Amino acid sequence: MSLPRLKLISFTLCPFVQRAMIVLNEKNIPFDIEYIDLSAPPPWFYDISPLEKVPVLLVDDEPLFESMVICEYLDEITDGSLYPADAFQRAKNRAWIEFGSDILSTTFEFYNTSDEKRFKHLIDILTDRFEVLEDEISDGDYFNGEKFSMVDAVYAPVFRYHKRIAKLKDYGLFKDTPKIKAWGDKLLERDSVIKSVPDSYEHDMSNYIKKLNSVFRNEVKDSL
Ligand SMILES: N[C@@H](CCC(=O)N[C@@H](CS)C(=O)NCC(=O)O)C(=O)O
């Protein structure tokens, strides 16, 4: 099948961009990439991104926005779906993808809040979310068992965030979730996941955290 010309408009630290990159890598889809500075986007970005967010996928120059819409489009134009064949299992996978998006927004708030009480509450929320998720993971290396799926593409950036956080300070988020820990480690060593961020990622992430005015930044600043 001949594929359209694809270009991913990206930001180096964005976990939603990473989802799309992982699917592109998993399915060996040729694409171009352009990183933009989200603090000062180029004027053309406003014409292609209705919500002024990345990722945007240019498909033969036509913009497509929203990471999961992009991931599903990429899955549909190539062979071998990253979703289960059974409709109910597919729907359940999509529900756990929503759960992953919720963890991402909670993690974003965890990075950014300057309210001590809220920060502690966010640790409890995240710990609880991972405990709930622990019971949903199949036996095997990946969420559905032995086969890498769309759910894995969504959670890999979540674990990249949390591995980074744990390296700076261990908040015990995974203390009662050995399956999650093993799943996260497995995902982070996968080629498609490693290649979903630029070489500058660690450095850019440290700079991002240094500039925060938040409880988290204050707690880890000496380790950055
Ligand atoms: N629901 C969107 C979320 C994308 C998103 O939040 N992207 C962030 C970067 S990680 C962004 O572009 N933020 C720019 C802004 O909010 O101004 C998706 O899944 O694509």
Image: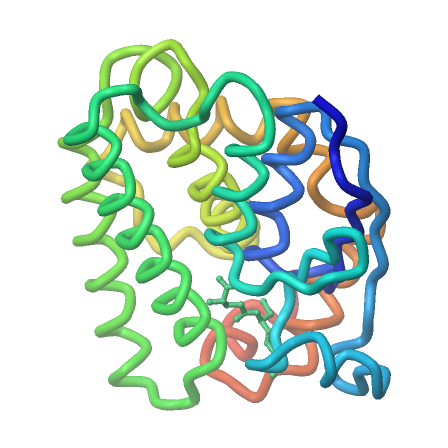
Quadrant position of residue 211: bottom right
60 and 70: which is toward the camera: 60
Question: In x, y percent, where is residue 92?
Answer: 19, 37
Q: Which colour scheme is used?
A: rainbow
Q: Is residue 133 left or right of residue 209?
A: left
Quadrant position of residue 5: top right
Q: Is residue 196 above or below residue 42?
A: above
Q: In this view, does 38 lie above or below 181?
A: below
Instruction: Name the residue at the front extreme.
Output: 1
3 and 156: which is toward the camera: 3
178 and 34: which is toward the camera: 34
- Taking the spot 49% from the left edge, 22% from the top edge, the residue there is 186
- Taking the spot 56% from the left edge, 31% from the top edge, the residue there is 188
Quadrant in which the C terminus is drawn = bottom right
77 and 136: which is toward the camera: 77
Q: Quadrant of ligand 1?
A: bottom right
Question: In x, y percent, where is residue 55?
Answer: 64, 62
- Taking the spot 29% from the left edge, 19% from the top edge, the residue there is 85
Question: In x, y percent, where is residue 183?
Answer: 39, 26
Question: In x, y percent, where is residue 175?
Answer: 26, 40
**How many numbered circles are shown?**
0
Q: In this view, does 85 lie above or below 112?
A: above
Q: Is residue 209 left or right of residue 156?
A: right
Quadrant in which the N terminus is drawn = top right
- Taking the spot 14% from the left edge, 31% from the top edge, the residue there is 135
